[in-house]
Amino acid sequence: MFKSQRFIIGIGAILLLTSLAMGRTTAGFADPAVHTARWEAVDTSALVSSDRQEDNAEKGTDEQEAIRQAVQTLVARWSDAVLPSSGWLHVVTHHTRDKDKTSLLPNGQPIPLNYISETWYRLDDRGQVVEAVALMRSEEGQPIQVGTFRENTWRNLTVGEKWKGEPFTPRLDLGFSADVAQAPEWGSTLDRRMVTWAGRPALRFVMRDEFAPPRRIEGYAQPVVRGERRAWFDPDSGALLLLERVLVMADGTERVVERVEPVTIERGVEPPAEVLALLQQEVAK
């Protein structure tokens, strides 16, 4: 059994399920289409020679690569400890969001800013998901959205839709390492530092995207000048402790688009009968 002390699923009807496979964020600044703006830190000092500038640039590039490799190493360490064997994997995460307006499901049901995501994955002997049940609930326990994956087909039982898929590997880091791997292409910058989180040592990584000119993002009144993804990892096990997606507004204020805190990650536990029964439900579309 694997549990954390306190450990994205997408918001839309389809993203609830596809994010289980892709681990992609739904915040606007995480979309590759938003990464068209490129920026360069230019040293205008006449006292720095061109050779020195090239040396500094190379050193900076090496440091960015070292940070990317550090993230991949931590994520691989935790995944190798949790995923290799077949059986059920149970993951619960707590999501809190800061937006100026709430979103709606296609059926008109509002999605609360804060919610609980509970997912049961059945893994094969390669650690790939062959069946899954995803439950989105309010903090008070009220059901919001239910989806399943079975026989290479995704089903959203809440809105009555289904579409083809294929087995996938769960992203225990909620897609952070995939985003970090794209940092050079997107023009993002990375940094890392050792911090204290909940009274324990943690490695915090930050991925930054500068927006010039500022961008409008749905759900927020002010334009955005910078986006950040922040992830805290256990330096020994590689377990994800906390993930934040942050927007910095034109007036300098920070809005936490989403904070995701893993609550439970455990193996060897069978889903309740009512969860297994959801796998047998069918939708018409």
Image: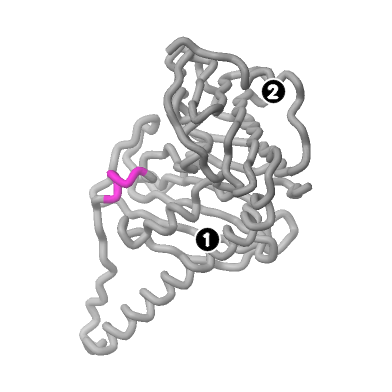
**Residue at x 33%, y 80% (from the top left corner):** 58
Going by the numbered disc 1, the residue's amino acid type is Phe
**Residue at x 56%, y 65% (from the top left corner):** 73
**Residue at x 29%, y 50% (from the top left corner):** 35
Vertical relation: 127 (above or below) 205 = above
Neighbours of disc 1 within 10 Å: few (<14), some (14-19), many (20+): many
Disc 2 versus disc 1: nearer the observer: 2
Q: Position of residue 21 (x, y in %)?
A: 50, 39
Describe residue 279's horizontal placement relative to residue 106 as left or right.
right
Q: Position of residue 183 (x, y in %)?
A: 37, 59
CB within 8 Å, label 2 to label 1: no
Q: Position of residue 283 (x, y in %)?
A: 50, 13
Query: Callout 2: helix, strand or loop?
Result: helix
- The disc at residue 205 is 1
Which image quadrant: the C terminus? Answer: top left
Q: Quadrant of residue 59?
A: bottom left
Q: Position of residue 132 (x, y in %)?
A: 60, 31
Query: Callout 1: helix, strand or loop?
Result: strand
Residue 70 visible within the image: yes
Residues shaded magenta = 31-35
Residue 255 visible within the image: no
Disc with the residue nearer the chain's start (2 vs 1) = 1
In this view, the residue in front, 161 or 253, is: 161
**In magenta stretch: residue 12:** no
Between the C-alphas of marks 2 and 1, the distance is 37 Å
In this view, the residue in front, 167 or 260, is: 167
**In magenta stretch: residue 33:** yes
Going by the numbered disc 2, the residue's amino acid type is Leu
In this view, the residue in front, 165 or 93, is: 165
Vertical relation: 159 (above or below) 211 = above
Q: Which residue is mark 2?
A: 276
Name the colour scheme.
one colour
